Image (cartoon, helix red, strand yellow):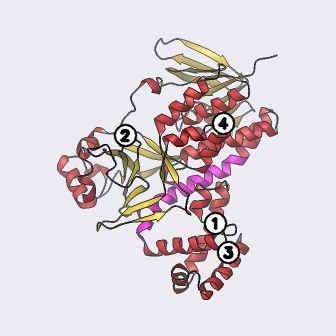
Amino acid sequence: MRVKRATIIGAGLVGSLWALFMAKRGYEVNVYERRADMRKQEMVAGRSINLALSDRGLRALRTLGLEPRIREMAIPMHGRLVHMPNGNSGLQPYGEHGQYINSISRGGLNALLMDEAEQHPNVTFHFNTRSIEIDQQKNEVLLEDTLTGKQFLTHSDVIFATDGAFSMVRNSMVKTDRFDYSQHYLPHGYKELSIPPDEGGGYRMDHSALHIWPRKSFMMIALPNLDGSFTCTLFLAFEGTIAFENLTTVPQVEAFFQEQFPDLIELMPNYVEEFFGNPTASLVTIKCYPWVHKGKIALMGDASHAIVPFYGQGMNSGFEDCTVLNELADEFHEDWPHVLDAYQRNRKPNTDGIAELAVRNFIEMRDLVADPFFQLQKQVEKQLHRRYPARYVPLYTMVTFSEVPYAEALRRANIHDAFFAKANRDQMQLIASQPESPDAEQLMDLWVDTIEKSY
Protein backbone atom coordinates (compact mmCIF):
# COMPACT_ATOMS: atom_id res chain seq x y z
CA MET A 1 0.00 0.00 0.00
CA ARG A 2 1.31 3.43 -0.96
CA VAL A 3 2.35 5.66 1.95
CA LYS A 4 0.23 8.81 2.23
CA ARG A 5 2.42 11.85 2.97
CA ALA A 6 1.54 15.29 4.30
CA THR A 7 3.79 18.31 4.86
CA ILE A 8 2.94 20.95 7.44
CA ILE A 9 4.87 24.23 7.39
CA GLY A 10 4.80 25.72 10.89
CA ALA A 11 4.68 24.01 14.29
CA GLY A 12 2.56 26.58 16.11
CA LEU A 13 -0.81 25.85 17.66
CA VAL A 14 -2.71 25.17 14.43
CA GLY A 15 0.13 23.23 12.79
CA SER A 16 0.63 20.99 15.80
CA LEU A 17 -3.10 20.36 16.15
CA TRP A 18 -3.48 19.57 12.45
CA ALA A 19 -0.54 17.18 12.66
CA LEU A 20 -2.59 15.19 15.18
CA PHE A 21 -5.61 15.09 12.89
CA MET A 22 -3.52 13.95 9.92
CA ALA A 23 -1.66 11.35 12.01
CA LYS A 24 -4.97 9.79 12.95
CA ARG A 25 -5.76 9.58 9.24
CA GLY A 26 -2.69 7.44 8.75
CA TYR A 27 -0.53 9.99 6.95
CA GLU A 28 3.21 10.21 7.29
CA VAL A 29 3.41 13.76 8.62
CA ASN A 30 6.47 15.99 8.53
CA VAL A 31 6.21 19.32 10.33
CA TYR A 32 8.84 21.96 9.55
CA GLU A 33 9.43 24.88 11.93
CA ARG A 34 11.96 27.68 11.44
CA ARG A 35 12.37 28.27 15.18
CA ALA A 36 14.06 26.02 17.71
CA ASP A 37 11.95 23.58 19.71
CA MET A 38 10.00 25.84 22.06
CA ARG A 39 9.86 23.08 24.64
CA LYS A 40 13.59 23.53 25.12
CA GLN A 41 13.52 27.34 25.13
CA GLU A 42 12.38 30.01 27.55
CA MET A 43 9.21 31.84 26.54
CA VAL A 44 10.09 35.20 25.00
CA ALA A 45 8.77 37.98 27.24
CA GLY A 46 6.16 40.28 25.79
CA ARG A 47 4.80 37.97 23.11
CA SER A 48 1.24 36.75 23.81
CA ILE A 49 1.93 34.60 26.85
CA ASN A 50 -1.67 33.49 27.31
CA LEU A 51 -4.81 33.16 25.23
CA ALA A 52 -8.57 32.82 25.67
CA LEU A 53 -9.80 29.34 24.76
CA SER A 54 -13.53 28.99 24.13
CA ASP A 55 -16.07 26.59 22.64
CA ARG A 56 -14.86 26.46 19.03
CA GLY A 57 -11.33 25.63 20.09
CA LEU A 58 -12.51 23.16 22.72
CA ARG A 59 -14.57 21.32 20.11
CA ALA A 60 -11.44 20.56 18.07
CA LEU A 61 -9.60 19.37 21.17
CA ARG A 62 -12.60 17.29 22.23
CA THR A 63 -12.55 15.51 18.86
CA LEU A 64 -9.03 14.31 19.65
CA GLY A 65 -9.86 13.37 23.25
CA LEU A 66 -7.68 16.15 24.68
CA GLU A 67 -10.28 18.34 26.37
CA PRO A 68 -9.89 16.95 29.92
CA ARG A 69 -6.13 17.50 29.90
CA ILE A 70 -6.49 20.97 28.43
CA ARG A 71 -8.99 22.03 31.08
CA GLU A 72 -6.44 21.14 33.75
CA MET A 73 -4.18 23.81 32.24
CA ALA A 74 -6.89 26.46 31.96
CA ILE A 75 -8.33 29.07 34.32
CA PRO A 76 -12.06 29.80 33.87
CA MET A 77 -12.95 33.48 33.38
CA HIS A 78 -16.66 34.10 33.92
CA GLY A 79 -16.83 37.71 32.79
CA ARG A 80 -15.17 41.06 32.32
CA LEU A 81 -14.20 42.86 35.52
CA VAL A 82 -14.20 46.50 34.44
CA HIS A 83 -11.99 48.98 36.34
CA MET A 84 -13.14 52.58 35.95
CA PRO A 85 -10.91 55.68 36.22
CA ASN A 86 -12.66 56.67 39.49
CA GLY A 87 -11.58 53.43 41.12
CA ASN A 88 -14.95 51.67 40.91
CA SER A 89 -15.16 48.23 39.35
CA GLY A 90 -17.89 45.82 38.33
CA LEU A 91 -18.28 42.37 36.78
CA GLN A 92 -20.03 41.97 33.44
CA PRO A 93 -20.74 38.22 33.03
CA TYR A 94 -19.96 36.77 29.61
CA GLY A 95 -23.06 34.62 29.35
CA GLU A 96 -25.44 32.58 31.44
CA HIS A 97 -24.45 30.82 34.64
CA GLY A 98 -21.81 28.19 33.93
CA GLN A 99 -20.56 29.81 30.72
CA TYR A 100 -16.97 31.01 30.72
CA ILE A 101 -13.86 31.38 28.61
CA ASN A 102 -10.49 29.96 29.60
CA SER A 103 -7.16 31.66 30.14
CA ILE A 104 -4.47 29.26 28.93
CA SER A 105 -0.74 29.41 28.34
CA ARG A 106 0.11 29.64 24.66
CA GLY A 107 3.41 27.87 25.20
CA GLY A 108 1.96 25.22 27.49
CA LEU A 109 -0.81 24.36 25.05
CA ASN A 110 1.56 24.31 22.07
CA ALA A 111 3.97 22.03 23.92
CA LEU A 112 1.19 19.61 24.86
CA LEU A 113 -0.01 19.41 21.26
CA MET A 114 3.50 18.72 20.00
CA ASP A 115 4.01 16.08 22.68
CA GLU A 116 0.76 14.41 21.72
CA ALA A 117 1.59 14.50 18.02
CA GLU A 118 5.01 12.93 18.63
CA GLN A 119 3.33 10.00 20.35
CA HIS A 120 2.38 8.93 16.82
CA PRO A 121 5.27 7.18 15.05
CA ASN A 122 4.15 8.68 11.74
CA VAL A 123 4.73 12.31 12.90
CA THR A 124 8.14 13.99 12.82
CA PHE A 125 8.92 17.59 13.81
CA HIS A 126 11.90 19.28 12.16
CA PHE A 127 13.02 22.40 14.05
CA ASN A 128 15.46 25.09 12.93
CA THR A 129 14.23 24.42 9.40
CA ARG A 130 13.36 27.40 7.25
CA SER A 131 11.05 27.29 4.24
CA ILE A 132 12.73 29.05 1.33
CA GLU A 133 10.32 28.60 -1.56
CA ILE A 134 7.59 26.34 -2.82
CA ASP A 135 7.23 24.86 -6.26
CA GLN A 136 3.48 24.89 -6.70
CA GLN A 137 3.57 22.84 -9.87
CA LYS A 138 5.59 19.98 -8.39
CA ASN A 139 4.18 20.28 -4.86
CA GLU A 140 7.69 20.56 -3.49
CA VAL A 141 9.08 22.78 -0.74
CA LEU A 142 12.70 23.90 -0.64
CA LEU A 143 13.87 23.94 2.97
CA GLU A 144 17.04 24.90 4.77
CA ASP A 145 18.51 23.60 8.00
CA THR A 146 19.42 26.92 9.66
CA LEU A 147 22.08 25.30 11.85
CA THR A 148 24.03 23.69 9.01
CA GLY A 149 22.92 25.72 5.99
CA LYS A 150 22.06 22.51 4.15
CA GLN A 151 19.12 22.78 1.73
CA PHE A 152 16.80 19.98 0.69
CA LEU A 153 13.48 19.34 -1.05
CA THR A 154 10.40 17.67 0.37
CA HIS A 155 7.49 16.30 -1.62
CA SER A 156 4.11 15.12 -0.37
CA ASP A 157 0.54 14.46 -1.44
CA VAL A 158 -0.69 17.64 0.22
CA ILE A 159 0.94 20.66 1.88
CA PHE A 160 -0.63 22.64 4.70
CA ALA A 161 0.73 26.09 5.50
CA THR A 162 0.30 27.00 9.16
CA ASP A 163 3.28 29.36 9.22
CA GLY A 164 1.54 32.40 10.61
CA ALA A 165 0.59 35.90 9.59
CA PHE A 166 3.71 36.38 7.48
CA SER A 167 3.54 32.97 5.82
CA MET A 168 6.21 32.07 3.28
CA VAL A 169 3.80 29.73 1.53
CA ARG A 170 1.18 32.44 1.19
CA ASN A 171 3.81 34.88 -0.06
CA SER A 172 4.61 32.44 -2.87
CA MET A 173 0.92 32.17 -3.71
CA VAL A 174 0.61 35.96 -3.88
CA LYS A 175 2.72 35.82 -7.04
CA THR A 176 0.16 33.65 -8.85
CA ASP A 177 -2.55 35.04 -11.12
CA ARG A 178 -5.78 36.36 -9.55
CA PHE A 179 -4.61 36.00 -5.96
CA ASP A 180 -6.16 38.66 -3.70
CA TYR A 181 -4.24 39.85 -0.66
CA SER A 182 -4.63 42.68 1.82
CA GLN A 183 -3.19 43.64 5.18
CA HIS A 184 -4.41 46.38 7.47
CA TYR A 185 -2.62 47.60 10.59
CA LEU A 186 -4.42 49.27 13.45
CA PRO A 187 -2.94 52.59 14.57
CA HIS A 188 -2.58 50.92 17.96
CA GLY A 189 0.08 48.53 19.17
CA TYR A 190 0.46 46.49 22.33
CA LYS A 191 2.98 45.90 25.08
CA GLU A 192 2.84 43.08 27.61
CA LEU A 193 3.46 43.65 31.33
CA SER A 194 2.78 41.48 34.36
CA ILE A 195 1.37 41.32 37.87
CA PRO A 196 3.41 38.84 39.93
CA PRO A 197 1.89 36.53 42.56
CA ASP A 198 1.63 37.85 46.11
CA GLU A 199 4.12 36.87 48.80
CA GLY A 200 2.24 33.62 49.44
CA GLY A 201 2.05 32.68 45.77
CA GLY A 202 -1.60 33.67 45.45
CA TYR A 203 -3.42 36.06 43.16
CA ARG A 204 -3.46 39.80 43.84
CA MET A 205 -6.84 40.17 42.08
CA ASP A 206 -9.90 38.06 41.33
CA HIS A 207 -8.61 35.36 38.97
CA SER A 208 -12.06 34.22 37.80
CA ALA A 209 -12.44 37.16 35.40
CA LEU A 210 -10.70 38.95 32.56
CA HIS A 211 -9.81 42.40 33.89
CA ILE A 212 -10.23 45.50 31.72
CA TRP A 213 -9.23 49.11 32.36
CA PRO A 214 -11.13 50.95 29.53
CA ARG A 215 -9.86 54.43 28.81
CA LYS A 216 -11.75 55.46 25.65
CA SER A 217 -8.98 55.41 23.01
CA PHE A 218 -6.82 52.84 24.81
CA MET A 219 -7.01 50.13 27.47
CA MET A 220 -5.22 47.65 29.67
CA ILE A 221 -6.34 44.04 30.12
CA ALA A 222 -5.14 41.28 32.45
CA LEU A 223 -5.53 37.49 32.23
CA PRO A 224 -4.65 35.08 35.05
CA ASN A 225 -1.93 32.43 34.91
CA LEU A 226 -1.69 29.19 36.88
CA ASP A 227 1.29 30.42 38.94
CA GLY A 228 -0.70 33.23 40.57
CA SER A 229 0.47 35.93 38.16
CA PHE A 230 -1.45 37.95 35.59
CA THR A 231 -0.35 38.78 32.07
CA CYS A 232 -1.29 42.40 31.36
CA THR A 233 -1.48 43.94 27.91
CA LEU A 234 -1.51 47.67 27.23
CA PHE A 235 -3.18 48.56 23.92
CA LEU A 236 -2.22 52.09 22.94
CA ALA A 237 -1.81 54.20 19.80
CA PHE A 238 1.66 54.39 18.32
CA GLU A 239 1.28 58.11 17.59
CA GLY A 240 -0.70 60.95 19.10
CA THR A 241 -1.06 62.83 22.37
CA ILE A 242 -1.52 59.69 24.47
CA ALA A 243 0.68 57.24 22.59
CA PHE A 244 3.77 55.09 22.72
CA GLU A 245 5.76 57.80 20.96
CA ASN A 246 5.32 60.01 24.03
CA LEU A 247 6.30 57.34 26.56
CA THR A 248 10.04 57.23 26.02
CA THR A 249 11.39 58.19 29.45
CA VAL A 250 10.88 56.83 32.95
CA PRO A 251 9.16 60.02 34.22
CA GLN A 252 6.74 59.94 31.26
CA VAL A 253 5.81 56.30 31.90
CA GLU A 254 5.42 56.84 35.64
CA ALA A 255 3.22 59.89 35.10
CA PHE A 256 1.10 57.99 32.55
CA PHE A 257 0.45 55.11 34.93
CA GLN A 258 -0.19 57.44 37.87
CA GLU A 259 -2.84 59.26 35.86
CA GLN A 260 -4.45 56.35 34.00
CA PHE A 261 -3.87 53.21 36.09
CA PRO A 262 -3.04 54.28 39.68
CA ASP A 263 -4.60 51.10 41.10
CA LEU A 264 -2.18 48.97 39.07
CA ILE A 265 1.05 50.59 40.24
CA GLU A 266 1.33 48.73 43.55
CA LEU A 267 0.30 45.48 41.83
CA MET A 268 3.03 45.83 39.17
CA PRO A 269 6.32 46.49 40.97
CA ASN A 270 8.33 45.99 37.78
CA TYR A 271 6.10 47.85 35.33
CA VAL A 272 8.73 50.45 34.39
CA GLU A 273 11.44 47.85 33.72
CA GLU A 274 9.00 45.69 31.74
CA PHE A 275 7.70 48.67 29.78
CA PHE A 276 11.17 49.41 28.44
CA GLY A 277 12.32 45.80 28.31
CA ASN A 278 9.42 44.26 26.41
CA PRO A 279 8.78 44.98 22.72
CA THR A 280 5.94 47.07 21.36
CA ALA A 281 4.14 44.92 18.80
CA SER A 282 1.74 45.81 16.00
CA LEU A 283 -1.80 44.60 15.32
CA VAL A 284 -2.63 43.42 11.81
CA THR A 285 -5.58 41.94 9.94
CA ILE A 286 -4.64 39.85 6.90
CA LYS A 287 -7.07 38.59 4.28
CA CYS A 288 -6.41 36.64 1.11
CA TYR A 289 -8.06 34.37 -1.45
CA PRO A 290 -7.87 31.69 -2.72
CA TRP A 291 -6.53 29.68 0.19
CA VAL A 292 -5.73 26.60 -1.88
CA HIS A 293 -3.75 25.80 -5.00
CA LYS A 294 -4.69 22.96 -7.35
CA GLY A 295 -6.08 20.84 -4.56
CA LYS A 296 -2.61 20.19 -3.12
CA ILE A 297 -1.68 23.25 -1.04
CA ALA A 298 -3.83 24.88 1.65
CA LEU A 299 -3.43 27.84 3.98
CA MET A 300 -4.71 27.50 7.55
CA GLY A 301 -4.93 29.69 10.65
CA ASP A 302 -3.12 33.03 10.58
CA ALA A 303 -1.56 32.19 7.22
CA SER A 304 -4.99 32.61 5.67
CA HIS A 305 -6.81 34.92 8.09
CA ALA A 306 -4.76 36.73 10.73
CA ILE A 307 -6.97 38.87 12.98
CA VAL A 308 -6.52 41.26 15.89
CA PRO A 309 -6.93 39.66 19.34
CA PHE A 310 -9.90 41.56 20.76
CA TYR A 311 -12.50 38.83 20.47
CA GLY A 312 -10.14 36.12 21.69
CA GLN A 313 -10.89 34.12 18.54
CA GLY A 314 -7.55 33.94 16.73
CA MET A 315 -6.60 30.53 18.09
CA ASN A 316 -10.23 29.39 18.25
CA SER A 317 -10.87 30.23 14.59
CA GLY A 318 -7.65 28.44 13.60
CA PHE A 319 -8.71 25.37 15.56
CA GLU A 320 -12.12 25.58 13.88
CA ASP A 321 -10.27 25.46 10.52
CA CYS A 322 -8.99 22.05 11.65
CA THR A 323 -12.45 20.88 12.70
CA VAL A 324 -14.07 21.89 9.41
CA LEU A 325 -11.24 20.53 7.28
CA ASN A 326 -11.30 17.22 9.15
CA GLU A 327 -15.06 16.87 8.68
CA LEU A 328 -14.78 17.67 4.98
CA ALA A 329 -11.99 15.10 4.59
CA ASP A 330 -14.44 12.53 5.96
CA GLU A 331 -17.26 13.75 3.74
CA PHE A 332 -15.19 13.67 0.53
CA HIS A 333 -13.10 10.59 1.46
CA GLU A 334 -9.82 12.54 1.35
CA ASP A 335 -10.34 13.60 -2.25
CA TRP A 336 -8.20 16.65 -1.52
CA PRO A 337 -9.15 18.84 -4.49
CA HIS A 338 -12.81 18.60 -3.45
CA VAL A 339 -11.99 18.78 0.27
CA LEU A 340 -9.87 21.90 -0.01
CA ASP A 341 -12.24 23.69 -2.36
CA ALA A 342 -15.15 23.11 0.04
CA TYR A 343 -12.92 24.16 2.97
CA GLN A 344 -12.05 27.57 1.55
CA ARG A 345 -15.61 28.27 0.42
CA ASN A 346 -16.88 27.41 3.91
CA ARG A 347 -14.27 29.26 5.92
CA LYS A 348 -13.52 32.42 3.94
CA PRO A 349 -16.79 34.32 4.66
CA ASN A 350 -16.68 33.25 8.28
CA THR A 351 -13.11 34.34 8.91
CA ASP A 352 -13.87 37.66 7.19
CA GLY A 353 -16.76 37.95 9.65
CA ILE A 354 -14.67 37.37 12.77
CA ALA A 355 -12.00 39.74 11.45
CA GLU A 356 -14.59 42.53 11.39
CA LEU A 357 -16.01 41.55 14.75
CA ALA A 358 -12.54 41.53 16.33
CA VAL A 359 -11.91 45.14 15.32
CA ARG A 360 -15.37 46.13 16.57
CA ASN A 361 -14.71 44.46 19.89
CA PHE A 362 -11.65 46.65 20.42
CA ILE A 363 -13.95 49.67 20.43
CA GLU A 364 -16.34 47.85 22.75
CA MET A 365 -13.66 46.85 25.24
CA ARG A 366 -11.82 50.16 25.42
CA ASP A 367 -14.88 52.40 25.33
CA LEU A 368 -18.39 50.92 25.27
CA VAL A 369 -18.10 48.64 28.33
CA ALA A 370 -18.28 51.85 30.37
CA ASP A 371 -21.13 53.39 28.33
CA PRO A 372 -24.55 53.40 30.07
CA PHE A 373 -26.54 52.68 26.89
CA PHE A 374 -24.24 49.81 25.95
CA GLN A 375 -24.70 48.32 29.41
CA LEU A 376 -28.48 48.77 29.17
CA GLN A 377 -28.60 47.03 25.78
CA LYS A 378 -26.61 44.11 27.17
CA GLN A 379 -29.04 43.79 30.10
CA VAL A 380 -32.02 43.76 27.74
CA GLU A 381 -30.35 41.23 25.45
CA LYS A 382 -29.69 38.98 28.43
CA GLN A 383 -33.39 39.06 29.36
CA LEU A 384 -34.43 38.32 25.78
CA HIS A 385 -32.06 35.37 25.65
CA ARG A 386 -33.31 34.01 28.97
CA ARG A 387 -36.92 34.22 27.83
CA TYR A 388 -36.25 32.93 24.30
CA PRO A 389 -32.94 31.03 24.44
CA ALA A 390 -33.29 29.63 20.90
CA ARG A 391 -34.89 32.64 19.23
CA TYR A 392 -32.64 35.45 20.48
CA VAL A 393 -28.95 34.86 21.04
CA PRO A 394 -26.61 37.79 21.88
CA LEU A 395 -23.56 38.30 19.70
CA TYR A 396 -20.99 37.32 22.32
CA THR A 397 -22.83 34.08 23.01
CA MET A 398 -23.04 33.26 19.30
CA VAL A 399 -19.31 33.84 18.80
CA THR A 400 -17.95 32.37 22.01
CA PHE A 401 -20.40 29.76 23.29
CA SER A 402 -21.88 28.32 20.10
CA GLU A 403 -20.99 26.99 16.67
CA VAL A 404 -23.07 29.58 14.80
CA PRO A 405 -20.95 30.50 11.76
CA TYR A 406 -19.12 33.78 12.32
CA ALA A 407 -20.67 35.34 9.21
CA GLU A 408 -24.17 34.53 10.44
CA ALA A 409 -23.34 35.89 13.91
CA LEU A 410 -22.21 39.15 12.32
CA ARG A 411 -25.36 39.37 10.17
CA ARG A 412 -27.64 38.87 13.15
CA ALA A 413 -25.66 41.29 15.31
CA ASN A 414 -26.13 44.02 12.72
CA ILE A 415 -29.87 43.41 12.88
CA HIS A 416 -29.83 43.54 16.70
CA ASP A 417 -27.85 46.79 16.78
CA ALA A 418 -30.11 48.46 14.21
CA PHE A 419 -33.16 47.48 16.26
CA PHE A 420 -31.82 48.77 19.57
CA ALA A 421 -30.61 52.01 18.01
CA LYS A 422 -34.29 52.84 17.41
CA ALA A 423 -35.75 51.22 20.55
CA ASN A 424 -37.45 53.30 23.23
CA ARG A 425 -35.05 53.89 26.12
CA ASP A 426 -37.81 53.80 28.78
CA GLN A 427 -39.06 50.47 27.46
CA MET A 428 -35.52 49.10 27.58
CA GLN A 429 -35.23 50.24 31.20
CA LEU A 430 -38.49 48.48 32.01
CA ILE A 431 -37.28 45.17 30.55
CA ALA A 432 -33.93 45.47 32.32
CA SER A 433 -35.37 46.34 35.74
CA GLN A 434 -38.69 44.44 35.74
CA PRO A 435 -38.32 41.58 33.25
CA GLU A 436 -41.11 39.50 34.81
CA SER A 437 -43.73 42.24 34.74
CA PRO A 438 -46.63 41.73 32.28
CA ASP A 439 -45.72 44.90 30.35
CA ALA A 440 -42.08 43.83 29.99
CA GLU A 441 -43.02 40.31 28.89
CA GLN A 442 -45.43 41.71 26.31
CA LEU A 443 -42.70 44.01 25.00
CA MET A 444 -40.18 41.18 24.77
CA ASP A 445 -42.70 39.03 22.86
CA LEU A 446 -43.19 41.84 20.37
CA TRP A 447 -39.52 42.67 20.05
CA VAL A 448 -38.37 39.11 19.42
CA ASP A 449 -41.08 38.64 16.79
CA THR A 450 -39.93 41.84 15.07
CA ILE A 451 -36.25 40.90 15.19
CA GLU A 452 -36.90 37.35 13.91
CA LYS A 453 -38.73 38.71 10.88
CA SER A 454 -35.57 40.64 9.98
CA TYR A 455 -33.46 37.47 9.99
Circle 3 sits on which residue?
451
Q: Which residues are magenta?
A: 346-371
Question: Disc 2 marks which amino acid?
Answer: Gly
Question: Disc 4 marks which amino acid?
Answer: Leu
As helix, strand or loop, the secondary structure at mark 1 comes to loop
Mark nearest the camera among 4 and 1 is 4
Q: Earlier in the sequence, mark 1 or mark 2?
A: 2
Q: Residues within 10 Å of mark 3 (few under 14, many from 20)?
A: some
Query: Residue 282 versus residue 225: which sits nearer the camera?
Result: 225
Q: Earlier in the sequence, mark 4 or mark 1?
A: 4
Q: Main secondary structure of the magenta part?
A: helix
Circle 1 sits on which residue?
393
For the N terminus, the quadrant is top right
For the C terminus, the quadrant is bottom right
Q: Is residue 204 visible?
A: yes
Q: Are marks 2 and 4 in contact (CB under 8 Å)?
A: no
As helix, strand or loop, the secondary structure at mark 4 comes to loop
Displayed quadrant of residue 386: bottom right
Circle 4 sits on which residue?
64
Question: Disc 1 marks which amino acid?
Answer: Val
Residue 226 spot, x, y in % from top left: 41, 42
Q: Answer above or below: position of 151 versus 108.
A: above
Residue at image position (64%, 41%) is: 62
As helix, strand or loop, the secondary structure at mark 3 comes to helix
Label 2 vs label 3: CA separation? 44 Å
Mark nearest the camera among 1 and 3 is 1
Residue 147 spot, x, y in % from top left: 46, 14
Label 4 vs label 3: CA separation? 38 Å
Displayed quadrant of residue 138: top right
Q: Is residue 354 magenta?
A: yes
Circle 2 sits on which residue?
46
